[in-house]
Image: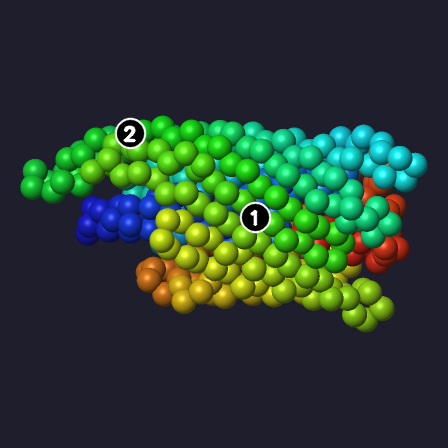
Amino acid sequence: MKKIFILLLFSLLVQKSFGQQSTFYTQYMNNLYVVNPAAAGAYNASDFKLAIRRSGMSIEGAPQAVFFSGNTCFLQKYGNQSYFKHGVGVVINNETAGLLGRTGVQANYAFHLPLNPKKGQYVSMGLTYGFQTYTFDEKAKIVRDPTDPVGNTVFNGNSPEGNVSFLWYSPDFFVGLTSNLLTPQKLRWFNDNTLDRVHQFTAGYKFLFAENKFGLIPSCLVRMAGKSLQYDATMTLRMQNKFWAGFTYRGGQGTAFFAGAGSKFFNFTYSYDFFKTNFSGYHEFTLGVRINKKSNRFVEASSYKPKNGLNVPIWN
């Protein structure tokens, strides 16, 4: 029975997770940098996040993913009150599901141009280069069926990635676009499948109320891979950036709920996904550490007072 489940997970993985080339990441509002590298350096701080995403199925080979991201900011004075911002960062991912695995590294640079320094409004562009390595688990031999083309396929491949991203943001809103896989790659995967180009659009807006102590943030993530279209619609409630909670509707595929808490230096978020087509949902945990620079020019240029705790980019 366990072998049957492992093969079933393999099939689901081939058709969905790896076919889409980018794993569902529910907590994009907790780490926008993962889906839009132009966000690197948006905070005047060094920001590190470790995320673990795992299926609720308690069997060997259940899908799981681990992400590590880090980015930091360097300021360059421009005029009397404006600052260019330069951001650099890295993302490392490791994903397994059934018989397949994927490991990748991406490094990026982002340049932030001030549009309205008094309101903390910037536009940024990010350039990313990295690679993904896809592997077939040799332990598949224990479930190999001589008549099964899946169990008798040896799969191994590398895919370089070159991404470009754009982001327009302030303490009130953000609008971003990321284009992945600018050069489609072929992998040795059954019939030498070609990976699709992936484009991701993100946007969000913050409404303040209760004397600016609370923020209500509707946001969205739209993903286009080849001919497929997926979207997440999210609503987040924040209280002075110390506590947050919300829910996500994943266009026709499921829903997710999340909650988190944080301080000036640490934050933690937990989410649970419900998928209509899966036997169980997904748990996702994210731990963040932020080391602030001595002078936060972004906050000083903001249109809100620092005591509100909501005068930074609206993602966490």
Mark positioned earlier in the residue sequence (1 or 2):
2
Viewer-proximal residue, 304 or 67? 304
Residue 212's x, y, as percent?
Answer: 82, 65
| Observer able to see residue 309 | yes
Residue 289's x, y, as percent?
Answer: 68, 40
Residue at 70% across, 50% down: 169
Above or below — where is 195 with respect to 284? Answer: above
Answer with left or right where residue 229 lies relative to residue 1. Answer: right
Residue kind at label 2, given as amino acid type = Asn
Residue kind at label 1, given as amino acid type = Leu
Residue 149's x, y, as percent?
Answer: 13, 40
The tag on residue 156 is: 2
The count of marks equals 2
Q: Residue furthest left?
A: 147
Q: Which residue is mark 1?
A: 177
Above or below — where is 208 with respect to 2? Answer: below
Label 2 crowd bin: few (<14), some (14–19), many (20+), radius 10 Å: some
Nearer to us of marks 1 and 2 is 1
Spatial CA distance of label 1 from label 2 is: 31 Å
Give SS at disc 2: strand
Answer with left or right where residue 104 lies relative to residue 167. Answer: left
Residue at 50% across, 56% down: 222
